[in-house]
């Protein structure tokens, strides 16, 4: 690397953009994020359209789809021009040109990369930082919106960045709304922490009041109220009709509203709502996924129903379609399909076994493996009654480094088995857990 390249690389690393925000995750998680962004859609009313395309560009680049990354960056620029007055657009371009500089750098187009860096420097001169050490509120809020899409630690940071931006521009309703959603995602309902619960509910109430067109916020607020014992049936039904009239998007509010329906109203009403949404837009994969999920929850609720087998058949048909519509991110869907085969009144154990055998013999990254091993261990325990195999696969899940929620669940299940003291493998499990704990210290 010559001195000019070294100097450019140093400048790139100082930019505030997706390439410097520590967004490194597994390939499978990147594909999940890519599909989620695609399911948001491109409706111009979406308040984060430019930010969505910026993130989408980073994901495409990281997945080695450079042409798609450049197309998304072009769409991001168009979206910012569309949604921002020309005299205030400058700060919105800082992250965009930072991303563009990095993409050109990785393409060995160093001259174009340098031009983008120069553009960022010009923007910073034209729009000075609010104060030393602070970011522009537009950069703060884009960083926050991006971080809240990732893990718990990043969502906590997102809350801080939203608060920084809101302190500088408190009148921005879409910032307030996303801040409230970030709080909801981090501080899950806990009845023993009434102070925090009241704070989150109040933030959601204010966001709903100030941003009445944001039906996703309205759905999350209703769901949170339900968890605190306030079930508003009529409000939920009115909200459902509003959502059905809106452009289709995974940000429409349908998913949390379906969760409200099946938790506080009924599984049948949730199925009816998801079915109506799909009838209106039969080619939208996200809606088909929501209907499939609604059937699965009904099947696993163990409610008596004379239509149970027909529901299993309908769920299997939907899940088969969903797998084909999400070809690179269908692991979880395949595992859910296997569980429905296992629950079917008609013996479909062989079909469930075939799904697991195919998945176990295919290449998976560590995140996927933990999910697969955990679900297979559960399947072996509850459906096959093979306790030994279940323990073996919980051990496989737990010993994968950097455990995700599935690896942690397997660890906790093994610990409970050992603490009960009724399994003949308790001593072996204890030694395994102690070795694992000492290794992770």
Image: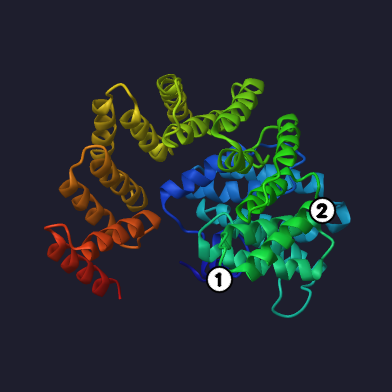
Q: At 39% across and 58% down in the image, what residue appears?
A: 404
In the rendered view, does 295 fall on the left or right side of 371? right
Seen in the image, is 46 located left or right of residue 268?
right
Q: Secondary structure at mark 2?
A: helix
Q: Position of residue 285 (x, y in %)?
A: 55, 29
Please tell me which residue lies in front, 83 or 301. Answer: 301
Quadrant of the rendered structure where residue 20 is?
bottom right
**Quadrant housing the C terminus:** bottom left
Whether the residues at callouts 2 and 1 have beta carbons within 8 Å, the answer is: no
Estimate the spatial distance between the alpha carbons at disc 2 and disc 1, rounded to whole Å.
Answer: 45 Å
Disc 2 packing (10 Å; few <14; some 14–19; many ≥20) = some
* Circle 1: element type: helix
Of 200 and 2, the residue lying toward us: 200
| Front disc: 2 or 1 | 2
In this view, the residue farthest toward the front is 304
Q: Position of residue 109 (x, y in %)?
A: 56, 53
* Residue that protrudes farthest toward the bottom in the picture: 132
Mark 1 neighbour density, 10 Å: few (under 14) some (14–19) many (20 or more) = few
Residue drawn 86% across and 52% down? Answer: 86
Closer to the chain start, of discs 2 and 1, is: 1
**Is residue 319 or residue 342 the one in the foreground?**
342
Location of mark 2 (residue)? 209
- Residue 238, picture quadrant: top right
Does residue 189 appear left or right of residue 322 in this picture? Answer: right
Badge 1 is on which residue?
Answer: 10
The residue drawn where x is 29% and y is 45% is 378
At 20% from the left and 41% from the top, the residue drawn is 385
Q: Is residue 12 visible?
A: no
Image mark for residue 252: none
Across and down, in percent, residue 144 comes to 65, 61
């Amino acid at each position: 690397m010559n001195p000019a390249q070294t100097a450019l690389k140093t400048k790139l690393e100082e930019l505030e953009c997706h390439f410097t925000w520590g967004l490194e995750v597994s390939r499978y998680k990147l594909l999940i994020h890519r599909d989620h962004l695609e399911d948001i859609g491109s409706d111009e009313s979406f308040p984060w359209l430019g930010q969505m395309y910026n993130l989408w560009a980073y994901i495409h680049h990281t997945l080695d789809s450079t042409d798609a990354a450049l197309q998304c960056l072009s769409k991001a620029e168009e979206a910012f021009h569309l949604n921002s007055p020309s005299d205030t657009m400058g700060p919105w371009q800082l992250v965009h040109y930072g991303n563009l500089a990095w993409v050109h750098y990785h393409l060995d187009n160093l001259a174009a990369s340098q031009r983008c860096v120069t553009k960022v420097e010009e923007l910073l001169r034209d729009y000075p930082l609010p104060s030393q050490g602070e970011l522009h509120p537009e950069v703060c809020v884009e960083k926050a919106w991006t971080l809240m899409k990732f893990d718990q630690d990043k969502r906590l940071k997102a809350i801080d960045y939203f608060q920084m931006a809101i302190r500088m521009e408190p009148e921005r309703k879409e910032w307030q709304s996303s801040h409230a959603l970030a709080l909801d995602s981090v501080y899950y309902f806990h009845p023993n922490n009434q102070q925090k619960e009241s704070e989150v509910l109040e933030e959601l109430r204010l966001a709903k009041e100030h941003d009445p067109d944001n039906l996703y916020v309205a759905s999350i607020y209703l769901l949170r109220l339900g968890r605190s014992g306030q079930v508003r049936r009529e409000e939920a039904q009115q909200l459902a009709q509003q959502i059905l009239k809106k452009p289709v998007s995974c940000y429409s509010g349908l998913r949390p509203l379906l969760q409200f329906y099946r938790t506080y109203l009924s599984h049948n009403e949730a199925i009816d709502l998801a079915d109506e949404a799909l009838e209106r837009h039969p080619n939208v994969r996200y809606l088909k996924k929501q209907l499939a999920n609604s059937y699965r929850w009904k099947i696993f609720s163990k409610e008596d129903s004379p239509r149970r087998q027909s529901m299993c058949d309908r769920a299997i048909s939907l899940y088969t379609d969903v797998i084909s519509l999400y070809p690179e991110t269908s692991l979880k869907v395949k595992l859910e399909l296997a569980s429905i085969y296992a629950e079917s009144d008609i013996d479909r154990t062989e079909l469930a076994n075939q799904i697991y055998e195919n998945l176990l013999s295919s290449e998976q990254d560590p995140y996927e493996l933990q999910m697969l091993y955990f679900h297979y261990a559960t399947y072996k325990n509850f459906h096959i009654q093979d306790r030994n195999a279940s323990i073996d696969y919980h051990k496989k899940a737990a010993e994968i480094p950097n455990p995700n929620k599935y690896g942690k669940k397997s660890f906790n299940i093994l610990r409970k088995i050992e603490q009960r003291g009724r399994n003949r493998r308790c001593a072996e499990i204890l030694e395994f857990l102690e070795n694992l704990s000492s290794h992770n210290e």
